[in-house]
Image (cartoon, rainbow, N blue to C red):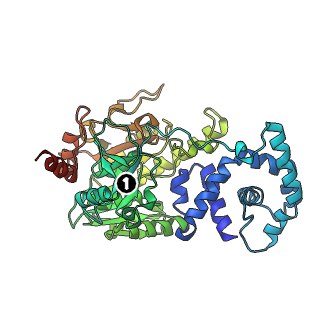
Amino acid sequence: MNFYRDCAGVLTRLAEKKGSVQSLISTLPEKDRRRGAALIIETLKYHPVLLEIIQTSGILQHEKKILKDSNLVLLLVHDLLLSKGGIQAADGPIKQAVLKHKTRLSAELVKVKVKRGVTKVEDLAVSTAGSSGNGRRWVRLNTLKSSQEDILRALEKEGFTYVDGEHDLSGKAFILDRHIPNLVAIAPSVRIQESTLFNEGKLIIQDKASCFPAFVLDPPSNPNTHVIDATAAPGNKTSHLSALMQGRGRITAFERDRKRFQTLKTMLERAGASNVMPKNQDFLSVDPNDVEYANVTHILLDPSCSGSGIVNRLDHLVQTENEGDSETDKRLEKLASFQLTMIRHAMKFPSLRRLVYSTCSIHAKENEEVVIQALECDEAIQGGFLLEDRSKVIPAWPRRGMLPEGIATAFDPGSVIRCSPEDGTNGFFVSCFIRDGTASAPSKRKAEAMSEGSEDEGPKEPVAAKKKRKKRKV
């Protein structure tokens, strides 16, 4: 039953907007991940039908003392009615509570098919061909494990082909991103998890927008650098920081949830992020004046948010919140208050020079409004914090922030970044606070990316592709 409980936990976190379908499935134990992914996706495809069957059968009322987790019941009923193997769990009170209603549940399934005028169960499923931005899936080349050139060469040996950024992606074609170094896009249909490179940790599935925070933070790659990732799980941004630092210096990664902390450790080990020290601790419980953190100069802060920007070809299966709903408004207010508390706490670290605050939300209440309040708080005023200039926050990225209605402020929306599914990414927001007087020229890697990533220029051609092209000309 533990397998079903873990999958039910994924459904619960999806309903709470705590991640995308794919990112939450990745938190399942590796031995159960493929099986769990199949069960969760199939259950989501039949979610409206299963919910109707469960409600009309009255099973939750009849077995209310035993069946307390509605998502667990959803998964069990799916396997009972729609899976050839039935419920794959040892006998126990929960399984028996569902099995005793098999006849009633089966009858309700027949009624649903008649009502909807279908003869096949498959015709009751919701299509998974939902919106996926511009049809690209993003994969980061993990330079902690190998060089970009070697990874690209290995990709070509696996049948992948480099094309320039103007091409549509099909088959095993890939492009190099123009804004983020070591990031490629492939077609969503490609099963990159089956690649040897993925299994070796040399490829990491990470949305392009999710790569912006670490890149904007731009930590120096030297032995004395100390960075904090305040809310680190599942670990993609943390390992990205480690790669940008070339494995040098130190990253302290905080995660307060015990299960997510275990996921964080697994992901960091897989990525080879040896300069990261993970801590199962709430960032807000950390004393900024503790001597252990006296030299922290950079903090990445990606706290809990509504997750309203997370969209891919599977996530449209999850019911979304209604704009303007009073419960949603209350939830956003609570989240914004927490997010502001996190920023203010981060600004108390005495040596802090650069702080990136990001969310996977589309709501101004969690984004621009939080930033504006942060700029006006005591910690920002006394610490001399302001927003980094647009020229040093991926200037080639065209989609910038917005000015909330009815708010009079000197806030420059051009200094922050927004991402949208129209850009081929999840909805995302990134801002960068600097301590006044610390603004400096971008690092070498960022300067190179900025010069290569203008709106008029395409991505740099991989070395392996160049060599192959030269050989053809001779």
Residue designated by label 1: 300
Classify 10 Å Cα crowding around label 1: few (below 14), some (14-19), many (20 and above): many
Rendered location of residue 241, percent (x, y): 32, 58
Drawn side of residue 178 relative to residue 271, left or right = left
Image quadrant of residue 410?
top left
Choose between 100 and 107: the one closer to the eye.
107
Rendered location of residue 123, percent (x, y): 71, 42
Q: Amino acid at mark 1?
A: Leu
Q: Can residue 379 be seen here?
A: no
Choose between 5 and 253: the one closer to the eye.
5
> In percent of the image, x 55 and y 71: which residue is there?
31
Choose between 468 and 143: the one closer to the eye.
468
> In percent of the image, x 53 and y 44: which residue is there?
313
Quadrant position of the N terminus in the picture: bottom right
Choose between 185 and 394: the one closer to the eye.
185
Image quadrant of residue 197?
bottom left
Rendered location of residue 420, percent (x, y): 44, 36
Rendered location of residue 329, percent (x, y): 61, 38
